[in-house]
Image (tube, rainbow, N blue to C red):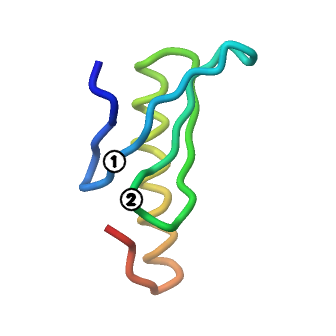
Amino acid sequence: MNPLLQYRGYFGSIEASAEDDCLYGKAQFVRALISYEGQTVSQLIAAFHTAVDDYLETCVNLKVGPEV
């Protein structure tokens, strides 16, 4: 498995929590906190895509440029 997810120019980490029995991550190389989680790899990827899309939509609504 690739150690980073990639979507729309953003990269995201892949971490596992044995304690919570889930996968989670956050966007890398940006100051904004863009986090996501899922129970499976497919869910984690979908959550990453949703988190990036939400971040970009928020930037548009706030009329600020997104970090890339």
Total numbered badges shown on the rendered structure: 2
Q: Position of residue 16 (x, y in %)?
A: 57, 21
For image coordinates 52% across by 28% down, the residue present is: 15
For image coordinates 50% across by 78% down, the residue present is: 61
Q: How many other residues sit within 10 Å of disc 2, few (<14), some (14-19) or many (≥20)?
A: few
Q: How many other residues sit within 10 Å of disc 1, few (<14), some (14-19) or many (≥20)?
A: some
Between 47 and 29, which is closer to the camera in this rendering? 29
* Of callouts 1 and 2, the N-terminal one: 1
For image coordinates 48% across by 23% down, the residue present is: 43
Give the secondary structure at mark 1: strand
Vertical side of 50 occupied by 53: above or below: below
Do the CB atoms of the residues marked 1 and 2 lie less than 8 Å apart? yes
Q: Which mark is residue 29?
A: 2
Give the secondary structure at mark 2: loop
Classify residue 52 as left or right of residue 21: left
For image coordinates 28% across by 46% down, the residue present is: 7
Between 58 and 20, which is closer to the camera in this rendering? 20
Amino acid beneath label 1: Phe
Please name which of the two marks, 1 or 2, marks the residue nearer to the observer: 2
Amino acid beneath label 2: Phe
Q: Which residue sits furthest right?
A: 19
Between 12 and 46, which is closer to the camera in this rendering? 12
Residue position marked by numbered label 1 in the rendering: 11
Classify residue 18 as left or right of residue 38: right
Q: Position of residue 54 (x, y in %)?
A: 49, 57
Residue 39 picture quarter: top right
Per the model, the C-alpha gap separating discs 1 and 2 is: 7 Å
Q: Position of residue 47 (x, y in %)?
A: 49, 36
Classify residue 9 as left or right of residue 39: left
Vertical side of 51 occupied by 30: above or below: below
Residue 2 picture quarter: top left
Q: Position of residue 48 (x, y in %)?
A: 44, 40
